[in-house]
Amino acid sequence: VGETAPNPSQADPTHPRIWLNARIATMAPSRAGLGGREGLGTIEGGAIATVGGRIIHVGDAADLPVLPDAERIDCEGRWITPGLIDCHTHLVFGGDRSHEFELRLAGASYEEIARAGGGINSTVTATRNASEDELVAASLARLDRLMADGVTTVEVKSGYGLSADAELKQLRAARRLGGLRHADIVTTFLGAHALPREFDDKDRFIDVLIADILPRVAKEKLADAVDAFCEGIAFSPAQCERFFKAAQALGLPVKIHADQLSDLGGAALAARLGALSADHLEYTSDQGAAAMAAAGTVAVILPGAFYFLRETHKPPIEAFRRHGTPMAVATDCNPGTSPLTSLLLAMNMAATLMRMTVDECLLGVTREAARALGRQDHIGTLEVGKQCDLAIWDIERPAELVYRMGFSPLHARVWRGQ
Ligand code: NIG
Ligand code: FE
């Protein structure tokens, strides 16, 4: 997808390039949507120009700057959106959990399997036993699936190592993916994901995370943020807060898996700490949603896990809407609860299962996903000065990107102007 015949400018990322005759959904803030709701910032018959990997023009072709050497690409009326952003994945892991899937089909619950020593810890064993090269190879196949849906930025969490060596190995594997494909990889140290088998005390494990693993991750600059799983089967709000405060003291922003299976007040904790995002949120209260809105913490909706666990308690979408909590949508690609590698299908699930609107879904995989990563100044909308990451689509209406199931109408993908 998106491969073209070799051409002289292809190899040079700084070369000027112009896309003409396009319908553009800039995703920049606007009020032009249905019923005065926020729209997609649409421009008909528009043009985008890039120099040096950044956008220097988006809008009317008549206003294009003079670029005599530019390569000119006729989009023939196709739609252009920002390159999509998958802001929550566990892309790097060893093994799979198809056996546990069968156990769940036979009646066991996710929590029962986790408490019996399966769940996250079975992937920890497989990830510890895999070499860094093996992790990279397995993850590349998944990254390629995401990219086939027009994804240009992927967040990747650790959390299946849970020892210093294995967490560092997982984060290094994640960073290497970025050198092997034309995509940005943003890494998150999910140290507090589960209690590893060799520990019997959660506070003791948090101590080790803070004293030993976190400083090494920070020193090697392997993580762009940290994350924790706040849940009965994982860590309490107090334990998560201790870990987060240590991370913030090292200058790392925080994200949290919150209120997925029960309401422990994870959303409120995220807001109080100024977290970039709180993710899952099936059991989040109205007060939690309001607190997140006030703090600007993004609600990352993960319909793949909701679907795969056959959850019935929906995240409070209407409360997020009413309070103005920004909403993003992501795959949560992971072997246990969301073996999903299609961000387009995640949008369809967010619409069908959670009643998010088409515009909310599309903003949720672009502008709001960028905000969930703290990268809203660089990616997520098509505006002058931002990185020129584009997805060019064979569609007649943006709603088609949300409406279809298991089909990618991607025509071409552009990353940093190439
Ligand atoms: O995002 N919620 C915790 N972490 C993952 C699942 C982890 C697993 O079961 O392997 C999630 O759903
Ligand atoms: Fe997750």
Image: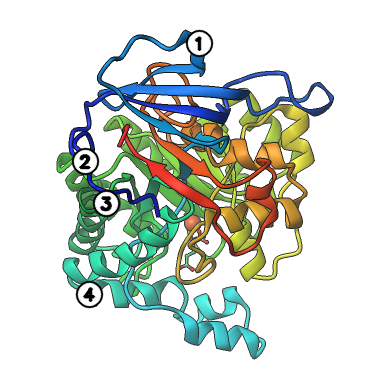
Looking at the image, do the residues carrying marks 4 and 2 touch, with CB atoms under 8 Å apart?
A: no
- Quick one: SS at disc 3? loop
The residues tagged by marks 3 and 1 sit, at their Cα atoms, a distance apart of 35 Å
Dot 1: element: helix
Q: Label 3 amino acid?
A: Arg
Name the kind of residue labelled 2 in the image. Ala
Residue 243 visible here: no
Residue sitting at x 77%, y 49%: 355
Name the side, left or right, on which 311 lies relative to 367. Answer: right
In the image, residue 190 sits, relative to residue 357, either above or below, namely: below
The residue carrying mark 2 is 218
Q: CA distance from mark 4 to mark 2?
A: 23 Å
Q: Which callout, 3 or 2, points at the residue further toward the start of the chain?
A: 3
Q: CA distance from mark 2 to mark 1?
A: 48 Å
Dot 1 crowding, Cα within 10 Å, few <14, some 14–19, many 20+? few
Mark 3 Cα within 10 Å, few/some/many (few <14, many 20+)? some
- Residue position for label 1: 62
Which kind of residue does numbered mark 4 sit on? Ala
Place residue 145 in its image quadrant: bottom left
Q: Is residue 277 left or right of residue 179?
A: right
Q: Which residue is mark 4?
A: 130
Task: Identify the mark nearer the N-term, 3 or 1.
Answer: 1
Q: Secondary structure at mark 4?
A: loop
Left or right: residue 259 compared with residue 207: right
User: Is 84 situated above or below 292?
Assistant: below
Residue matched to label 3: 181
Name the amino acid, label 1: Ala
For marks 1 and 4, give the one nearer the viewer.
1
